[in-house]
Image (cartoon, grey):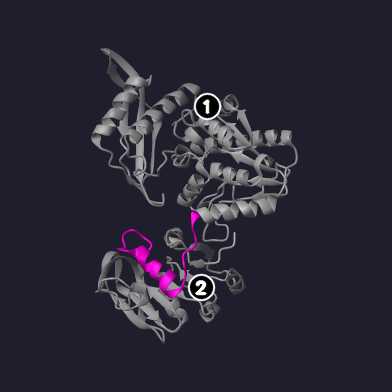
Amino acid sequence: MKNEELILIIDFYGQYNQLIARRVRECNVYSEIVPFNTSIEKIKEKNPKGIIFTGGPASVYGEDAPKCDPEIFNLGIPVLGICYGMQLMTYMLGGKVQRADKREYGVTAVNIDNSSKLFAGFDATNDCLMSHTDFVAELPEGFENIGSTDHCPNAAMQNREKNFYGIQFHPEVNHTNRGTEILRNFVYNICGCTGKWEMNSFVEDTIKALKEKIGDKKALCALSGGVDSSVAAALVNKAIGKNLTCIFVDHGLLRKNEAEEVEEVFTKNFDVNFVKVDARARFLEKLAGIEEPEKKRKIIGEEFIRVFEEEAKKIGAVDYLVQGTIYPDVIESGVGVGAKIKSHHNVGGLPDYVDFKEIVEPLRDLFKDEVRKAGLELGLPEFLVYRQPFPGPGLAIRVIGDITEDKLTILKDADYIFREEIAKAKLDRSINQYFAVLTNLKSVGVMGDERTYDYTIALRAVTTSDFMTAEWSKIPFEVLEKVSSRIVNEVKHVNRVVYDITGKPPATIEWE
């Protein structure tokens, strides 16, 4: 979908690039991330209202330092450089960047010139997150200083005439006070945006575009039951109705009642061809005796493809394959932006096992919170839209060790109790992810004056803004006590419950 107002974010391998895009969109202005080596022709074609340079780990003087086309500065488009982005702007426009005597890291009081459009409405000082080793020693010609700290004389700069701005700190992170307002000032006061990016208009425009693209042809969707695939299916269904067929593979690794809930939502609320495949026994057979997490993942991924392929062949040739790819998937898979972090099954090429002409990814430009908003706009129920993040391999990587039907039943029941009590305590929106893990540890217990030797359930709950780092959630003791009591009393073969209080890093969110 073409957006009239676009802020283009040039990525220099910044760890916060997604956060910058999110913050801009929170200002109701559409943003898009592109790699630093994007051609000037491509940038002109996108016709952005403003450009933001991200931070990055390199030094501008480094041999392999990422640099953009200098013609960007001749486009007449406002530019905001953040951290490395400010240093690069300085370097490319004739200023001087050098190594600081003292590395500046953490929340720092920045003295700012609030007569600048960038800091309009701010006090004379503002707490900001600094994270840099190099600093701007001499401003380029035409620039003036609009910010400083005790250790960084040029913490912010501007060229009023050309609308070029640089800040050494990170406005996109929560640690910077009123950081989003700084980006809002850039987007509105400097770039002249009016803020027309809203989810209801996205949904309407996307449905219209899908109608025009697909018309009366056939589309196929692999429906996992997760938020992304469900919203993608709902969007396409609104556009083409019964011409969409959703194949839902129940591999037995879903949470308690999940398969039934997904089926009910799509058969009762949408006019769609819904095919549910009961492949539970098939997956359990393939996973029998497998303990290594990566082997589990590969077996599940390959078997899912095989089941989907078999069902798709029954339908015959289709014109379009619908996938629930979202923007972080694209970025993390290294498709055009930055380094590859991890592979995503629905990014980076068309699968060769289904006879179709083209792929449709209606959510490709959205972040997870935006996908949820779109889901609500489409009429999906809240319990589905706000469903907990769930790994592709499902409960297979929350059962430590080999997988059996009995173990899955234990975990499903324990996890259900945990999620139910979190909801009752009204903590389900403040904790970003929470789930139970069936460990492969057995221990001695006493129940009803009898010795037991049963499983230990581990509870995991984290708070995070981006899932790249996370803190363990401080759930009230009385809630944990209720969860523990219910699990050991209601779930057979569990006699001990523990709570994981490890952050990310050093731990990951999932156990496997």
| Amino acid carrying mark 1 in the image | Gly
Residue extending furthest bottom?
Answer: 141
Instruction: Answer above or below: position of 182 versus 290.
Output: below
User: In this orientation, does residue 262 appear?
Assistant: yes
Does the magenta run of residues contain 464? no
Q: Is residue 182 above or below residue 452?
A: below
Q: Nearer the viewer, residue 80 or 495?
A: 80
Q: Is residue 490 above or below residue 466?
A: above
Find residue 318 and report its image quarter: top right
Q: Position of residue 508 (x, y in %)?
A: 40, 44
- Residue at 70% x, 41% y is 353
Q: Does residue 200 appear left or right of residue 140 in this picture?
A: right
Q: Label 2: state its secondary structure.
A: loop
Asked if the magenta segment contains residue 184, the reply would be yes
233, 157: nearer the viewer: 233
Spatial separation of the CA atoms under disc 1 and disc 2: 51 Å
Residue located beneath label 2 in the image:
67
Q: In which quadrant will I find the N terminus?
A: bottom right
Mark 1 or mark 2: name the one nearer the start of the chain. 2
- Residue wearing tag 1: 289
Q: Identify the image quadrant of the C terminus.
A: top left
Q: Is residue 432 left or right of residue 378?
A: left
Residue at the extreme right of the image, as rendered: 317
Q: Nearer the viewer, residue 218 or 308?
A: 218
Q: Is residue 403 above or below residue 363?
A: above
Q: Amino acid at mark 2?
A: Lys
Residue at 42% x, 65% y: name it: 57
Helix, strand or loop status at disc 1: loop
Give the farthest residue toward the top.
Answer: 449
Boundaries of the magenta span:
170-199
Could you classify mark 1 by the number of other residues whose Cα lies within 10 Å: few (under 14), some (14-19), or many (20 or more)? few
